[in-house]
Amino acid sequence: MTDKNVILTDDMFELLDDSEKNSEFIAIESKTFFRDTWDRFKKNKLALFGLIFLVLMVLGAIFVPMFSKYGYTTQNMQLRNALPSLEHPFGTDGLGQDILVRVMYGARISLSIGFVSALINLVIGVIYGGIAGYLGGKVDMVLMRIIDIIYSVPSVLYTLLILMVFGNNIFSMIVAISITSWIQMARQVRTQVMSLKEMEFAMAAKVLGAGHMRILLKHLVVNALGPIIVCLTMMVPNAIFTEAFLSMLGIGLDPLIPSWGALANDCRQLLFTYPIQIIWPIAAICLTILSLNFIGDGLGEALEAKR
Amino acid sequence: MIKYIIKRLLVGALTLFILMTVTFFAVRAIPGNPFAQDSRGLSPEAYAALEHKYGLDKPVTEQYVIFLQNAIKLEFGESIAKKGQQVIDIIADRAPVTFKLGVVAFVISVVFGIALGVISALTKKRWVNSLITTFATLGVSIPSFLFAIITMYLFGVKFKLVPLMGLDSWQNYILPAFALALSPISMITRLTRSSLKDVMNKDYITLARSKGTGELKVILKHGLKNAMLPIVTYCGPMFAGLVTGSLVIERLFTIPGIGAEFTNSITNRDYTLVMGLTIFLGLIVIIMTIVSDIVAALIDPRIKLGK
């Protein structure tokens, strides 16, 4: 026991040196969720390359057609099939149209189709998968059987039928792509919600009297955001692929719209004449799909590490 | 086991029925008319006679019932665009071409995929591994038809090593088959690699080795045999990919198979042929999925317990 007779005086203490004040403080700087993910994402070189490429592509898609002096159908009969030059960085095609502008205009179309259909998938997939996972039991079984049935037929068949019914415009292309690709998202969300709803915070929300919709959207879906984002990233290349595939079949968009698929379709004739021109659309499609896949993988790893 | 097979068959039948229904009504909803090409010179009476011949004058519900009855008897009627040819004959005529190509691509995918996967899982050299992994990443990202265009240019136009069109000799198969197999090879490589790596760390592999079994026998009999399951389950979807992928590959290489017929029938608004082909393609995919599910259940009895 301590001696009660000791009297504490000021000279028994001395001030601590400034440098030693925080010596016992060992916690690292606290980071927000997104900061943390970003830091991990940055370390993945391929993912970072993918992100940079995608940003450049989006900027190019927005600004190149806007500021170029050539429109995507501006023809110059004096300058047909020109090689790349300062005037036309990618050269010109058989009608003297600037290939750079056409490829970037194609990026506008293909990327919009990709992002819009991914967003539609997000909405449908989260609602469908969320309901199936949250309610479980019979509802879940019926909803999942429906998915199994839709999934077991190649999506190209549905896509073709829808394009035929609604005509070959961008709107029906987006509908056609979205009609089957939400399934993956729904499955992903369902699995996540099923495991998350058993956790304590979901129980706590329930005890506090939160409604079903609130628990599902504000608690469960928000906590499943990681896998959802990864799934979303993977859907964009899928949509770009499908658009190109259909246009190659000659039943995609109106061939006068220079979507990437339409440009790739033109390549078949160019093989024997001006093979240099086929590089650009092919490189644009492949690198974009590759970038998005890298970003998806990188995000997957960055978010996974959190768990 | 029998119960599982019956259940799978029932789900397959239901899927086929839904596909038939969707196709029937989608085709009816397509704007445009199968007789458009020759309707200009047609009198209203002749037009009515044509409609009567194909049963298009009856109410849609009645047409639907007739269609289902005929479909069970495998009668899809006469092609509208190709006068005097039965749909079933066209399919019988074209299907072998697509199947031959599909089987070649299937064999290539399995052989190359497993070989690359095994090498990559077992090699101690890092560069071999990263070479294969890079290939597998590129393989799933590059769309088959763009890969086909690139190889067409390199091997067909530039170096003139292989013929580009048709399917007359065995050399004709090389480019289209590899283009079709590109993505399956990469998928099987990934699956084999991860599955075999798992298996090779198991105790029974160590046991087999310690009993003095030769390394090759350990890999083939104890390792690969147990690592096959994910590859077998992938074969169903893979076949679906080969069938739908051949739509565009057949168009590129002007191969007269099912895919080429399918795209033509859509552009011609050939109702009967579109329906016949959609159902045929759907049927193949459904059967293949069921077969690969059943084989997987035979290999690993744990599967059906999980369902």
Image (cartoon, coloured by chain):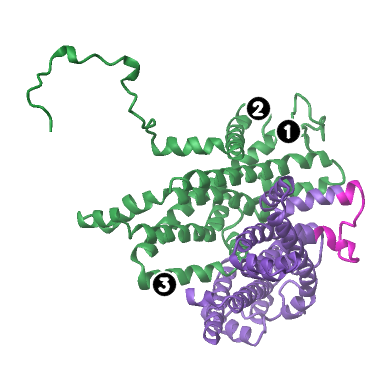
Q: CA distance from mark 2 to mark 1?
A: 10 Å
Judge whether A171 appears above or below A91 on screen.
below
Q: Which residue is mark 1?
A: A98
Q: Report the residue that reaches farthest toward the top.
A: A11
Residue B97 colored magenta?
no
The quadrant where residue B223 appears: bottom right
**What chain letter is assigned to the residue under label 3?**
A
Q: Is residue B170 magenta?
A: yes
Provide the residue span drawn in magenta. Answer: B155-176
Q: Label 1 neighbourhood size at 10 Å, few (<14), some (14-19), many (20+)?
A: many
Determine if marks 1 and 3 fall on one subunit. yes
Total count of labels: 3
Q: Which residue has dot 2 on it? A: A68
Residue A117 percent location from the top left of the image = 52, 51
What tint does the image give chain B? purple
> Is B12 in front, or is B217?
B217
Answer with left or right where residue B205 lies relative to residue A307.
Answer: right
Q: Amino acid at mark 3?
A: Met
Amino acid type shown at disc 1: Asp
Camera-side mark, 2 or 3: 3
In the image, A49: left or right of A143?
right
CB within 8 Å, label 2 to label 1: yes
Q: Which residue is mark 3?
A: A141
Viewer-side residue, B8 vs A245: B8
**Which of the two discs, 1 and 3, labels the residue nearer the N terminus?**
1
Mark nearer the N terminus (2 vs 3): 2
Q: Is residue B269 visible?
A: no
Element at badge 2?
loop
**Distance (Cα) linking label 2 and label 3:** 55 Å
Q: Residue at image x 20%, y 15%?
A: A13
Amino acid type at circle 2 is Ser
- Relative side of A58 to A20, left or right: right
